[in-house]
Each structure stands twice: as structure tokens, then as C-alpha cells.
Amino acid sequence: MKITNHEDLEVYKIAFESAMSIFNLTLTFPKEEKYSLTDQIRRSSRSVCANIAEAFYRRKYPKNFSSHLSDSIAEAAETRVWVNFAFACNYLSEESTETLLNEYSRIIGKLIVMYNQSEKWCI
């Protein structure tokens, strides 16, 4: 399969789907979490996707490409932290938590591979 834009990347698809899962799960979070945990977990999960897109379109500049991948990795790690907080606060089930943590570990792994093989991606 030819990759013509960021939406063709498997890691982007997984990140987008995971961010949408987080959005749907956070709809049930208490109102008092609206401007704290709910906002933080949604922002970090969406930022993973945004940084993947930015990295893809900055492939002409290897340092920018790597920087955005690094930011995406950090945002995915941050999302894992918020997922753990949501579980500890009893806002997420054990099953949802495990699924999200596994997905974000998978995303981080794929991004690290891209980062370590940036010469294959940069144009």
C-alpha cells in the first residue's frame, strides 16, 4: 500500500481510533472533571494524532520530523498516565483501562520504530 498522507499510516489510524475511544469513554466522567482529567486525557490523545500528521509533512526536514515524532511519543506516554488516573478514580473499567494502555504502548512502539528509522521516512 502506498502511503500518500498521514491518514494512511497504521500508527495514525490506531492513534485516531484510540483518541475517539477516549472521547467516548470520557463522556461518562463526572462534571467536576471537565476542566481537569477529562480535558487533559482528550488533549493528549488528540495531540498524538496531530504530531504524527505534522511529522509526516515535515519529512523534508529530518530534525523537525524527529522532533514531532518525539512529541507524539511523549503525548502517548502522557495519555497512559491520564488513563491510569482515570482507572484509579474508578472512571474506567479494568477492561477499558487495559485496552487503552495496550493500544498506547503499541502506538509508542510504532513511533519509536519510525523515529529510529527516520532516514527511511525523510525525503
Image: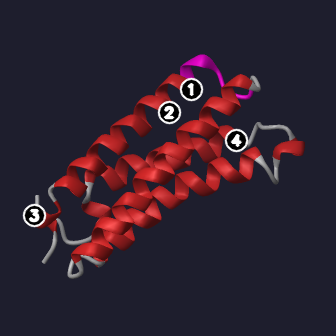
SS of the residue under disc 1: helix
Q: CA distance from mark 1 to mark 4?
A: 12 Å
Q: Which residue appears farthest toward the top when viewing the image?
A: 94
From the image, which quarter does the C terminus lie in? bottom left
> 17 and 102: which one is in front?
102
Which of the two discs, 3 and 1, sits closer to the camera?
Answer: 3
Residue 6 placement (x, y as % from top left)? 30, 66
* Magenta part of the chain: 91-96
Q: Residue at x 43, y 60 (%)?
A: 71
> 36 and 42: which one is in front?
36
Amino acid bearing label 2: Leu
The residue identified by callout 2 is: 100
The residue identified by callout 4 is: 26
Residues tagged 1 and 2 counted as in contact (Cβ below 8 A): yes
Label 3: few (<14), some (14–19) or many (≥20) C-alpha neighbours in 10 Å:
few
SS of the residue under disc 4: helix
> 4 and 75: which one is in front?
75
Amino acid bearing label 1: Thr
The residue identified by callout 3 is: 120
SS of the residue under disc 3: helix
Q: CA distance from mark 2 to mark 4?
A: 13 Å
In the rendered image, the vertical position of residue 8 relative to residue 55, given as above or below: above
Amino acid bearing label 3: Lys
The residue identified by callout 1 is: 97
Q: Earlier in the sequence, mark 1 or mark 4?
A: 4
Q: Earlier in the sequence, mark 3 or mark 4?
A: 4
Residue 72 placement (x, y as % from top left)? 42, 57
Q: Which residue appears farthest toward the bottom when viewing the image?
A: 60
Q: Residue at x 79, y 49 (%)?
A: 36
